[in-house]
């Protein structure tokens, strides 16, 4: 199991729950952006499991400017200097195809770190073609919901992608993977690894509040999400019982 950890605190919870790897990110409500240097440094110092930071300079689409691409390269250099185990990338062109030239540059720059292609894959105009391109470029795995809103809704497509991959790349179901549906996802797809945030809301301990003010766009600024250790354990238990 890989956990999408939105903080170092969540990463510790993932490790305690039995995850083998964290996709380390910030701003999970935006789909995940690159975490800070401090979090990456401490993650590699304190965690025993694999750390794969997401290389994503902002939320929104996966079409990046030259400046944003330069930032992505610098973030990969930082991850390499901190001995991260891998990175998670994804860049598309305007027509919905993979930006092979830029992705190949990032993959080469990342070596010897491994590379996962994130759910930008689900926004591609041709998933079968995109999968072959990722295999050709040398990606280790692809995180995908099968092009659907959630992995359970895209389960049949995930099954087809796993058959197409034929062991050349790992297809990792993600998006909406929960204790209620993981057994069904595994039954349909035959996937060997999966991805979940396993998060739950933590209520703020602030006593003094100004409800008329807002510091951002969150509907409830007096709660935040963290990975739940018990949920991680339960997901792994359910997955192992449905091999």
Image (cartoon, grey):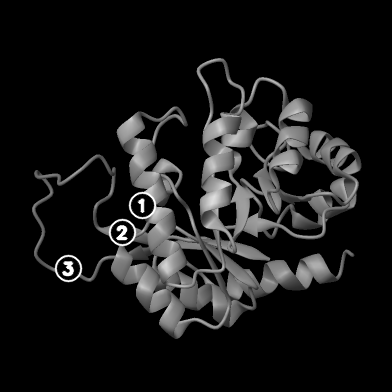
Q: Secondary structure at mark 3?
A: loop
Q: At x 20% / y 43%, what residue is drawn?
A: 216
Q: Position of residue 173 (x, y in %)?
A: 71, 49
Q: Residues within 10 Å of mark 1 (few under 14, many from 20)?
A: some
Residue 171 sits above or below residue 42 on the image:
above
Q: Position of residue 68 (x, y in %)?
A: 34, 37
Q: Residues within 10 Å of mark 2 (few under 14, many from 20)?
A: some
Q: At x 45% / y 77%, what residue is drawn?
A: 44
Mark linked to residue 123: none
Horizontal arrangement in the rendering, residue 68 relative to residue 229 (left or right): left
Q: At x 64% / y 78%, what residue is drawn?
A: 18
Q: Which residue is mark 3?
A: 206
Mark 3 or 1: in front is: 1
> Does residue 27 show up?
no
User: Between marks 3 and 1, how big is the CA–CA gap?
Assistant: 37 Å
Q: Position of residue 84 (x, y in %)?
A: 50, 69
User: Between marks 2 and 3, how big is the CA–CA gap?
Assistant: 10 Å
Which quadrant holds residue 120?
A: top right
Q: Which residue is mark 2?
A: 223
Along the polypeptide, which appears first: circle 1 or circle 2? 1
Q: Secondary structure at mark 2?
A: strand
Tell me the quadrant of the picture where the C terminus can be found: bottom right
Horizontal arrangement in the rendering, residue 74 relative to residue 227 (left or right): left
Q: Which residue is mark 1?
A: 74
Along the polypeptide, which appears first: circle 2 or circle 3? 3
Residue 50 sits above or below residue 173 on the image:
below
* Along the line of sight, the residue nearer the viewer: 213 or 48: 48
Q: Position of residue 129 (x, y in %)?
A: 76, 26
- Which residue lies most toward the top here? 95
């Amino acid at each position: 199991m890989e956990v999408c950890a939105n903080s170092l605190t969540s990463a510790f919870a993932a490790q305690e729950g039995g995850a083998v790897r964290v996709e380390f990110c910030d701003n999970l409500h935006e789909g995940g952006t690159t975490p800070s240097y401090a979090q990456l440094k401490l993650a590699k110092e304190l965690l025993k499991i694999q750390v794969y930071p997401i290389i994503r300079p902002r939320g929104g689409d996966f079409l990046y400017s030259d400046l944003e691409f330069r930032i992505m390269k610098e973030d990969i250099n930082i991850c390499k200097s901190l001995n991260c185990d891998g990175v998670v990338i994804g860049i598309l062109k305007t027509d919905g195809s993979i930006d092979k030239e830029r992705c190949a540059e990032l993959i080469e720059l990342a070596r010897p770190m491994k590379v996962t292609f994130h759910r930008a894959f689900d926004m591609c105009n041709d998933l079968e073609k995109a999968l072959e391109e990722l295999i050709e470029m040398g990606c280790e795995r692809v995180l995908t919901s099968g092009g659907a809103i959630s992995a359970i809704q895209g389960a049949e497509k995930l099954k087809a992608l796993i058959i197409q991959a034929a062991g050349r790349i790992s297809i990792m179901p993600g998006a909406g993977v929960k204790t209620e549906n993981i057994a069904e996802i595994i039954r349909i797809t035959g996937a060997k690894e999966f991805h979940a945030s396993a998060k739950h809301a933590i209520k703020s301990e602030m006593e003094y509040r100004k409800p008329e003010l807002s510091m951002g766009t969150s509907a409830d600024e007096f709660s935040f999400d963290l990975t739940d250790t018990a949920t991680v354990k339960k997901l792994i238990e359910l997955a192992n019982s449905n091999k």
